[in-house]
């Protein structure tokens, strides 16, 4: 990591112990913990409290999915989204955080030097700074896009009416989740993905199950297609794409651009004071979340590579502790078991390695799988598509990773994450009583499948002889 410039003068006294830039998940946790530890903390947010997750990310998207799955129309779905945001907003509100002792400011923050932060005409001096500025949608330099009716995951929620024809550029988690939701609401949906398949980070079988569900739902999938331009037509607009079979035009009323998100690292002084960035454009941090200035830390989407709300919150606690007490001791966040869920139908939940990643990293593994078609609760509910799959080192029960596909997969993932984080192998998972009939039983059943697979013929033959001897 590059050394910081040496041209700034450190103040003799400080107004604050901690200044936090950004009131999304990472910034809120940082500010909360700092104030709980009786530090003097200022939290600065230029937009809305709660950040992307509350206002344009996790909360509205999951409310939309729930409303669409329940059979509501677009107007009712929008009302459900508004109600969900309104119900959760008090948890992240200015009033709550001020009551907790946090000095909350709404405005543009700017780093004047490594210890001075400007908010309008006011300048604060601070011992430590935590940058939690989040990320924003990537807008490709696509000819004609600027003049077309396109939206992103942030502006989508301003739509007044359901698009009759929705084209989604990007077949990652965001694109797939929203495709199914809008198809259920009645839109004709097409996904355009440059990669050869959807959900390119997942195993091929997992992505195939999601793709099959989408096709059954009537969604058109154009994988292996590259977007060339947006053109105006006699009826409106069309996205021009090219695949193995040549070029074609896909008409749309709205185009949703969902090709990824980039960290917000410009516009608030990082360049001017020399905070180092990675080649990927994220803020470069060490294992303790410190930048090349040891008292300036970063957490959440600005650091990458995980753009998850739960990861931002996880890092936020460590950023607060290391920012306040790094002069005395430091705590290192652990990333051994990072869970992720894609809220499609079927849901895809994963922690640790999947088979694709294990192969790419040259890690030896064996697979233990249990199909939900064998699970009583899944059969009771008529939701038996999917499976639970563990990766373990050959001959050992240590969990390298777990993938769950199916109804409620995200809720089922927590025991696997806990076991992996605390190095509890499949034997201990098998020895844990699970209530019947629940979906979590599938994890225990998969652990039992592993144990059964590792029973040796020699050992079983010995047991047969023992039982014969006992019978006389």
Image (cartoon, helix red, strand yellow):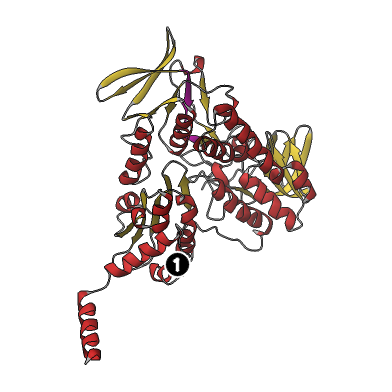
Q: Is residue 430 covered in magenta?
A: no
* Vertical relation: 227 (above or below) 328: above
**Callout 1: SS:** loop
Q: Position of residue 349 (x, y in %)?
A: 44, 50
Left or right of 115 in this view: 222: left
| Of residues 442 and 134, the one drawn nearer to the viewer in this rendering | 442
Residue farthest toward the bottom in the current orientation of the protein? 472
Q: Residues within 10 Å of mark 1 (few under 14, many from 20)?
A: some
Left or right of 135 in this view: 426: left
| Quadrant hosting residue 372 | bottom left
Q: Position of residue 210 (x, y in %)?
A: 37, 40
- Check the picture and name the quadrant holding the C terminus: bottom left
| Of residues 221 and 223, the one drawn nearer to the viewer in this rendering | 221
Instruction: Identify the residue at image location x=59%, y=22%.
Output: 160
Residue farthest toward the top in the current orientation of the protein? 234
Is residue 13 visible in the rendered image? The answer is no
Instruction: Identify the residue at image location x=49%, y=38%.
Output: 69
* Vertical relation: 174 (above or below) 399: above
Is residue 332 visible in the rendered image? The answer is yes
Q: Position of residue 432 (x, y in %)?
A: 45, 70
Residue of label 1: 423
* Vertical relation: 79 (above or below) 32: above
Q: What range of the chain is rendered magenta?
A: 253-261
| Quadrant hosting residue 459 | bottom left
Q: Position of residue 155 (x, y in %)?
A: 57, 27
Residue farthest toward the front in the current orientation of the protein? 380
Q: Is residue 256 covered in magenta?
A: yes
Instruction: Identify the residue at image location x=51%, y=59%.
Output: 334
């Amino acid at each position: 990591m590059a050394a910081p410039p040496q041209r700034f003068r450190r103040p003799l006294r400080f107004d604050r112990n901690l200044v936090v830039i950004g009131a999304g998940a990472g910034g809120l946790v940082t500010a909360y913990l700092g104030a709980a530890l009786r530090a003097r903390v200022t939290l600065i947010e230029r937009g809305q409290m709660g950040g992307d997750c509350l206002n344009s990310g996790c909360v509205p998207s999951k409310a939309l999915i729930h409303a669409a799955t329940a059979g509501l129309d677009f107007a009712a779905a929008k009302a459900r989204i508004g109600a969900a945001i309104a119900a959760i907003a008090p948890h992240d509100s200015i009033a709550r955080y001020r009551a907790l002792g946090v000095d909350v400011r709404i405005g543009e923050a700017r780093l004047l030097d490594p210890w001075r932060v400007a908010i309008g005409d006011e300048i604060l001096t601070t011992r430590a700074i935590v940058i939690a500025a989040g990320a924003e949608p990537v807008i490709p330099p696509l000819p004609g896009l600027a003049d077309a009716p396109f939206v992103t995951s942030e502006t989508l929620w301003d739509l007044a009416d359901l698009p009759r024809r929705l084209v989604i550029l990007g077949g990652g988690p965001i694109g797939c989740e929203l495709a199914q939701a809008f198809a259920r609401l009645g839109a004709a949906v097409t996904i355009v993905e440059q990669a050869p398949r959807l959900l390119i980070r997942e195993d091929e079988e997992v992505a195939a199950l999601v793709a099959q569900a989408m096709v059954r739902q009537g969604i058109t999938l154009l994988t292996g297609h590259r977007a060339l331009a947006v053109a105006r037509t006699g009826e409106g607009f069309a996205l021009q794409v090219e695949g193995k079979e040549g070029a074609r035009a896909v008409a749309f009323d709205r185009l949703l651009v969902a090709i990824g998100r980039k960290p917000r690292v410009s516009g608030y002084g990082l360049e001017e004071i020399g905070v180092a960035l990675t080649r990927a454009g994220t803020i470069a941090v060490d294992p303790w979340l410190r930048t090349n200035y040891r008292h300036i830390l970063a957490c959440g989407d600005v650091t990458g590579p995980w753009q998850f709300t739960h990861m931002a919150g996880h890092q936020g606690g460590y950023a607060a502790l290391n920012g306040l007490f790094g002069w005395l001791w430091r705590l290192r966040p652990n990333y051994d078991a990072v869970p992720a869920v894609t809220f499609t139908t079927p849901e895809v939940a994963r922690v640790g390695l999947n088979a694709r990643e294990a192969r790419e990293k040259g890690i030896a593994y064996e697979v233990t799988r249990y199909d939900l078609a064998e699970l009583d609760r899944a059969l009771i509910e008529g939701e038996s598509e999917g499976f639970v799959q563990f990766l373990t080192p050959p001959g050992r029960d240590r969990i390298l990773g777990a993938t769950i596909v199916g109804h409620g997969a995200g809720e089922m993932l927590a025991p696997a994450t806990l076991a992996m984080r605390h190095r509890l192998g499949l034997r201990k998972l098998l020895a844990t009583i699970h209530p019947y009939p629940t979906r979590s039983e599938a994890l225990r059943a998969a652990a039992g499948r592993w144990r059964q697979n590792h029973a040796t013929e020699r050992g079983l033959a010995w047991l047969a002889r023992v039982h014969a001897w006992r019978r006389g």
